[in-house]
Amino acid sequence: MNVEILQERLIQKLRDKGIKDERVLEAFRKVPRHLFVDSAMYMQAYEDNALPIGLGQTISQPYIVALMTQLLELEKDQNILEIGTGSGFQTAILAQFSRRVYTIERHQALGDRSRTRLRDMGYANVTFRIGDGTNGWPQWAPFDRIIVTAGAPVTPDTLSGQLAIDGIMVIPTGNRDEQELMVYKKAEDGLHSHSAGRVVFVPLIGQQGWKE
Ligand code: SAM
Protein backbone atom coordinates (compact mmCIF):
# COMPACT_ATOMS: atom_id res chain seq x y z
CA MET A 1 0.00 0.00 0.00
CA ASN A 2 1.09 3.53 -0.78
CA VAL A 3 2.94 5.40 2.03
CA GLU A 4 0.78 8.54 1.77
CA ILE A 5 -2.39 6.54 2.43
CA LEU A 6 -0.80 4.78 5.42
CA GLN A 7 0.46 8.12 6.75
CA GLU A 8 -2.97 9.78 6.42
CA ARG A 9 -4.61 6.89 8.28
CA LEU A 10 -2.07 7.22 11.09
CA ILE A 11 -2.55 11.00 11.22
CA GLN A 12 -6.32 10.50 11.51
CA LYS A 13 -5.71 8.13 14.45
CA LEU A 14 -3.52 10.76 16.12
CA ARG A 15 -6.29 13.36 15.64
CA ASP A 16 -8.87 10.94 17.09
CA LYS A 17 -6.65 10.49 20.14
CA GLY A 18 -6.48 14.24 20.74
CA ILE A 19 -3.46 15.58 18.83
CA LYS A 20 -4.58 19.04 17.71
CA ASP A 21 -1.37 20.83 16.79
CA GLU A 22 -1.48 20.88 12.98
CA ARG A 23 2.27 21.51 12.80
CA VAL A 24 2.88 18.24 14.64
CA LEU A 25 0.53 16.37 12.29
CA GLU A 26 2.25 17.96 9.30
CA ALA A 27 5.63 16.81 10.63
CA PHE A 28 4.27 13.23 10.56
CA ARG A 29 3.63 13.72 6.82
CA LYS A 30 7.22 14.84 6.27
CA VAL A 31 8.95 12.01 8.16
CA PRO A 32 8.18 8.53 6.72
CA ARG A 33 8.28 6.25 9.78
CA HIS A 34 8.99 3.08 7.80
CA LEU A 35 12.50 4.41 7.11
CA PHE A 36 13.27 4.15 10.85
CA VAL A 37 12.45 0.45 11.30
CA ASP A 38 13.53 -2.82 9.70
CA SER A 39 12.15 -3.09 6.14
CA ALA A 40 10.19 -6.21 7.16
CA MET A 41 8.05 -3.95 9.41
CA TYR A 42 7.00 -1.55 6.61
CA MET A 43 3.23 -1.89 7.20
CA GLN A 44 3.53 -2.04 11.00
CA ALA A 45 5.41 1.26 10.92
CA TYR A 46 2.08 3.02 10.26
CA GLU A 47 0.20 1.36 13.11
CA ASP A 48 0.08 3.23 16.39
CA ASN A 49 2.51 0.94 18.21
CA ALA A 50 6.06 0.95 19.56
CA LEU A 51 8.32 -1.40 17.57
CA PRO A 52 11.68 -3.07 18.31
CA ILE A 53 14.83 -1.37 16.97
CA GLY A 54 17.43 -3.78 18.46
CA LEU A 55 19.41 -3.90 21.71
CA GLY A 56 16.15 -4.28 23.64
CA GLN A 57 15.09 -0.73 22.66
CA THR A 58 12.02 0.58 20.83
CA ILE A 59 10.91 3.28 18.44
CA SER A 60 8.22 5.03 20.49
CA GLN A 61 4.50 4.73 19.71
CA PRO A 62 3.52 7.47 17.19
CA TYR A 63 0.85 8.86 19.53
CA ILE A 64 3.44 9.30 22.30
CA VAL A 65 5.89 10.99 19.90
CA ALA A 66 3.10 13.33 18.76
CA LEU A 67 1.92 14.02 22.32
CA MET A 68 5.43 14.80 23.61
CA THR A 69 6.09 17.06 20.62
CA GLN A 70 2.78 18.88 21.14
CA LEU A 71 3.52 19.31 24.86
CA LEU A 72 6.84 21.00 24.00
CA GLU A 73 4.92 23.91 22.37
CA LEU A 74 7.76 24.31 19.86
CA GLU A 75 8.56 27.55 18.12
CA LYS A 76 11.04 28.08 15.30
CA ASP A 77 14.63 28.95 16.19
CA GLN A 78 14.79 26.95 19.39
CA ASN A 79 17.54 24.66 20.57
CA ILE A 80 16.32 21.29 21.79
CA LEU A 81 18.10 18.68 23.89
CA GLU A 82 16.84 15.13 23.31
CA ILE A 83 17.92 12.27 25.57
CA GLY A 84 17.46 8.85 23.92
CA THR A 85 17.97 9.14 20.15
CA GLY A 86 16.86 5.52 19.56
CA SER A 87 15.83 5.19 15.90
CA GLY A 88 16.05 8.95 15.32
CA PHE A 89 12.34 9.24 14.42
CA GLN A 90 11.47 11.67 17.24
CA THR A 91 14.72 13.53 16.43
CA ALA A 92 13.60 14.00 12.81
CA ILE A 93 10.17 15.24 13.93
CA LEU A 94 11.83 17.77 16.29
CA ALA A 95 14.26 18.86 13.58
CA GLN A 96 11.30 20.09 11.48
CA PHE A 97 10.60 22.78 14.08
CA SER A 98 13.88 23.79 15.58
CA ARG A 99 17.11 25.63 15.00
CA ARG A 100 19.09 22.61 16.22
CA VAL A 101 18.45 19.32 17.98
CA TYR A 102 21.20 18.05 20.27
CA THR A 103 20.56 14.34 20.75
CA ILE A 104 22.30 11.83 23.03
CA GLU A 105 22.07 8.02 22.83
CA ARG A 106 23.87 5.64 25.19
CA HIS A 107 24.07 2.74 22.71
CA GLN A 108 26.79 3.37 20.15
CA ALA A 109 25.19 1.11 17.50
CA LEU A 110 21.81 2.89 17.70
CA GLY A 111 23.35 6.36 17.79
CA ASP A 112 25.61 5.65 14.80
CA ARG A 113 22.75 4.15 12.78
CA SER A 114 20.51 7.17 13.46
CA ARG A 115 23.29 9.61 12.63
CA THR A 116 23.83 7.93 9.23
CA ARG A 117 20.08 7.66 8.59
CA LEU A 118 19.36 11.33 9.28
CA ARG A 119 22.44 12.49 7.37
CA ASP A 120 21.30 10.43 4.35
CA MET A 121 17.82 11.97 4.67
CA GLY A 122 19.40 15.44 4.47
CA TYR A 123 19.03 16.70 8.05
CA ALA A 124 21.74 19.28 8.72
CA ASN A 125 20.47 20.69 12.04
CA VAL A 126 21.05 17.69 14.32
CA THR A 127 24.13 17.16 16.51
CA PHE A 128 24.65 13.61 17.80
CA ARG A 129 26.53 12.29 20.79
CA ILE A 130 27.02 8.85 22.30
CA GLY A 131 26.99 8.80 26.08
CA ASP A 132 24.95 9.11 29.25
CA GLY A 133 22.33 11.77 28.61
CA THR A 134 21.32 12.04 32.27
CA ASN A 135 24.16 14.57 32.64
CA GLY A 136 22.74 16.68 29.82
CA TRP A 137 25.09 18.53 27.48
CA PRO A 138 26.55 21.50 29.41
CA GLN A 139 28.53 22.73 26.39
CA TRP A 140 25.31 23.76 24.55
CA ALA A 141 23.13 24.67 27.55
CA PRO A 142 20.78 26.34 28.29
CA PHE A 143 18.20 24.62 26.06
CA ASP A 144 14.81 26.08 25.10
CA ARG A 145 13.31 22.61 25.22
CA ILE A 146 14.37 19.26 26.71
CA ILE A 147 12.76 15.92 25.88
CA VAL A 148 13.65 12.62 27.53
CA THR A 149 12.41 9.53 25.69
CA ALA A 150 13.19 6.94 28.40
CA GLY A 151 11.66 6.53 31.87
CA ALA A 152 13.59 8.10 34.79
CA PRO A 153 13.20 7.30 38.52
CA VAL A 154 13.15 11.07 39.21
CA THR A 155 13.82 14.19 37.12
CA PRO A 156 17.60 14.71 37.05
CA ASP A 157 18.56 18.11 38.54
CA THR A 158 21.26 18.40 35.89
CA LEU A 159 18.59 18.48 33.18
CA SER A 160 16.34 21.04 34.90
CA GLY A 161 19.51 23.09 35.50
CA GLN A 162 20.18 23.12 31.74
CA LEU A 163 16.67 24.34 30.85
CA ALA A 164 16.40 28.03 29.87
CA ILE A 165 13.98 30.43 31.58
CA ASP A 166 10.59 30.04 29.79
CA GLY A 167 11.83 26.61 28.69
CA ILE A 168 9.76 23.42 28.70
CA MET A 169 10.92 19.92 29.55
CA VAL A 170 8.96 16.70 28.99
CA ILE A 171 10.15 13.59 30.84
CA PRO A 172 8.54 10.32 31.94
CA THR A 173 9.25 9.62 35.63
CA GLY A 174 8.13 6.79 37.89
CA ASN A 175 9.01 3.14 38.33
CA ARG A 176 10.52 0.80 35.78
CA ASP A 177 7.11 -0.51 34.63
CA GLU A 178 5.05 2.68 34.40
CA GLN A 179 5.64 6.42 34.55
CA GLU A 180 3.88 9.78 34.62
CA LEU A 181 4.65 11.98 31.62
CA MET A 182 5.82 15.11 33.46
CA VAL A 183 5.80 18.55 31.86
CA TYR A 184 8.01 21.21 33.47
CA LYS A 185 7.90 24.92 32.67
CA LYS A 186 10.72 27.05 33.98
CA ALA A 187 9.86 30.55 35.18
CA GLU A 188 11.89 33.19 37.05
CA ASP A 189 10.40 31.85 40.30
CA GLY A 190 11.30 28.21 39.58
CA LEU A 191 9.88 25.09 37.97
CA HIS A 192 6.15 24.45 37.57
CA SER A 193 5.04 20.94 36.68
CA HIS A 194 2.01 18.85 35.78
CA SER A 195 1.42 15.29 34.61
CA ALA A 196 0.12 14.66 31.09
CA GLY A 197 -0.87 11.07 31.92
CA ARG A 198 0.52 7.60 32.39
CA VAL A 199 3.03 6.13 29.94
CA VAL A 200 5.34 3.13 29.60
CA PHE A 201 8.94 3.71 28.48
CA VAL A 202 12.14 1.67 28.50
CA PRO A 203 14.35 2.75 31.44
CA LEU A 204 16.68 5.73 31.39
CA ILE A 205 19.97 4.09 32.36
CA GLY A 206 22.74 6.27 33.73
CA GLN A 207 24.38 8.18 36.53
CA GLN A 208 21.16 10.07 37.31
CA GLY A 209 18.81 7.35 36.09
CA TRP A 210 18.40 3.63 36.72
CA LYS A 211 21.32 1.27 37.27
CA GLU A 212 21.82 -1.10 34.32
N1 SAM B 1 12.51 8.53 20.56
C1 SAM B 1 13.10 7.29 20.15
C2 SAM B 1 12.55 6.85 18.82
O1 SAM B 1 11.55 7.39 18.39
O2 SAM B 1 13.15 5.93 18.25
C3 SAM B 1 12.80 6.21 21.13
C4 SAM B 1 13.80 6.03 22.10
S1 SAM B 1 13.71 4.59 23.08
C5 SAM B 1 12.09 4.53 23.73
C6 SAM B 1 14.69 5.20 24.43
C7 SAM B 1 16.15 5.36 24.10
O3 SAM B 1 16.80 5.95 25.22
C8 SAM B 1 16.86 4.02 23.84
O4 SAM B 1 17.47 4.06 22.59
C9 SAM B 1 17.88 3.94 24.97
O5 SAM B 1 19.08 3.28 24.60
C10 SAM B 1 18.12 5.41 25.29
N2 SAM B 1 18.66 5.69 26.61
C11 SAM B 1 18.39 5.11 27.80
N3 SAM B 1 19.11 5.69 28.78
C12 SAM B 1 19.86 6.67 28.19
C13 SAM B 1 20.81 7.62 28.66
N4 SAM B 1 21.14 7.72 29.96
N5 SAM B 1 21.36 8.47 27.78
C14 SAM B 1 21.04 8.40 26.45
N6 SAM B 1 20.17 7.52 25.94
C15 SAM B 1 19.57 6.68 26.80
Image (spheres, grey):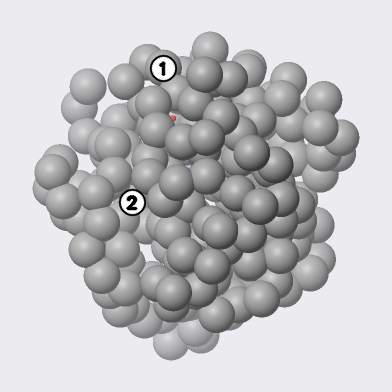
What residue is shown at x 42% (from left), y 50% (from top)?
A: 48
Amino acid type of the residue that numbered disc 2 sits on in the rendered structure = Pro
In space, the residues marked 2 and 1 are separated at their CA atoms by 26 Å
Residue 125 lies in quadrant = top right
Q: Residues within 10 Å of mark 2 (few under 14, many from 20)?
A: some
Residue 54 disc label: 1
Left or right: residue 123 versus residue 25 is: right
Q: Secondary structure at mark 2?
A: loop
For residue 93, the mark is none
First reached walking from the N terminus: tag 2 or tag 1: 1
Judged from the image, the secondary structure of the residue bearing numbered disc 1 is strand
Give residue 64's position: percent from left, percent from top. Answer: 41, 57
Residue 24 visible somewhere in the drawing: yes
Screen quadrant of the C terminus: top left
- Where residue 124 appears, as percent x and y from the top left, is 86, 39
Q: Which mark is residue 156?
A: 2
In this view, the residue farthest toward the front is 1
Write down which quadrant ligand 1 falls in: top left
- Residue 57: horizontal and vertical position, in percent? 37, 26
Foreground of the two, 118 or 102: 118
Residue drawn at (82%, 39%) of the image: 123
User: In front: 73, or 56?
Assistant: 56
**Compared with residue 208, is residue 145 higher up or lower down, i.e. above or below?**
below
Residue 104 seen in this snapshot: no
Q: Residues within 10 Å of mark 1 (few under 14, many from 20)?
A: some
Q: Amino acid at mark 1?
A: Gly
